[in-house]
Amino acid sequence: MKIISNPYELKKYLNGTSQSVGFVPTMGALHKGHISLIKKAKEENTFVVVSIFLNPTQFLKGEDLEKYPKKDEADKKICEIAGVDVVFFPHAKDIYTPDEASILAPNVRGYILEGASRPGHFNGVLSIVMKLLHIVNPTKAYFGKKDAQQLNLISLMVKQFFMDVEIIAVDTMRESDGLALSSRNIYLSQEQRKEALKISVSLYEASKMVSKKELHTTTIIKAMREQLAPLEISYVEIVNRGFEPIEAVEIGNTIILVEAKVGDTRLLDNIWL
Ligand code: PAF
């Protein structure tokens, strides 16, 4: 496995390959969710690149950039064991320069839900993903369904900017009790971890309501809010796959999303129906 920090060196290295390149962008602190992305990339491509870059521009002032878990050596080991060909491990100074052109998230889709809780967050996400895709120039890039809005915005960006890469959505990995895997789970105390289970349980109960033919989104959202209490809820929303609010669940075209705070930790989860 090769570790490359310089973007130009990586571009040069990859220019020589005629193989299909699968790309998994990450911010490090790799867990089983990331490994499932890498596995899928390996199944579908002959060459796999993983980037590890804690992207400062997607954190708002006062968020957890400084305390975000950093496990560089363990991450490299995980990549090696998972059979990654190249780890791209850049320094912020090689990625960003002062006073540069930037990508802005769409005015509506980028500022609802997660974008309303974290205004400007998706500008940072789209900017770094755009840069990484230009550096790696992959055949396919892999993103988790857990960050459903991020996935939607990236898929839109790639289309709208006529970029030649296929965006692949990968199912959320969960602990055996249902908690969605996240690098931020590490912040939870034992007690908070138990509280956090309300999130996946509320989604599971919502899907049970749907299977019993309760399709009205207001009814489902109300039941979920009751289940999530007393957690501090940022949003519970039901949208179609285009991220437009809907009045009734449409099987095959619906995502139910939750963001709630457990202690100081914001946790996201969703279910695709
Ligand atoms: O999902 C993440 O880990 C990040 O938002 C991403 C896509 C790697 C961009 O920094």
Image (spheres, helix red, strand yellow):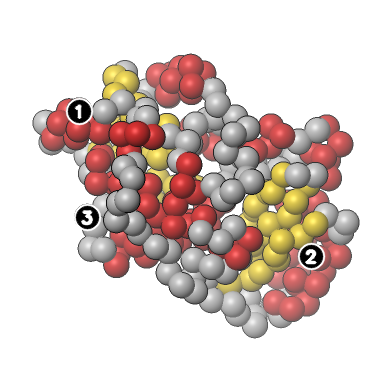
**Which residue sits at x=39%, y=62%?**
104
22 is higher (above) or lower (below) than 256: above
Q: Which residue is mark 1?
A: 9
Alpha-carbon neighbours of circle 3 within 10 Å: few (<14), some, or many (≥20)? some
What type is the residue that disc 3 sits on? Asp
Q: Which residue is mark 3?
A: 164
- The answer to whether one can see residue 151 in this image is no
Residue 40 position by quadrant: top left
- Viewer-side residue, 128 vs 222: 128
The N terminus: image quadrant: top left
Mark 3 in CB contact with mark 1 (< 8 angstroms): no
Label 3 with label 2: CB-CB less than 8 Å:
no
Q: Residue furthest bottom?
A: 247
Q: Nearer the viewer, mark 3 or mark 1?
A: 1
Q: Which amino acid type is marked by label 1? A: Glu
Expressed as whole percent of the image width and height from the top left, the position of residue 36 reads: 49, 36
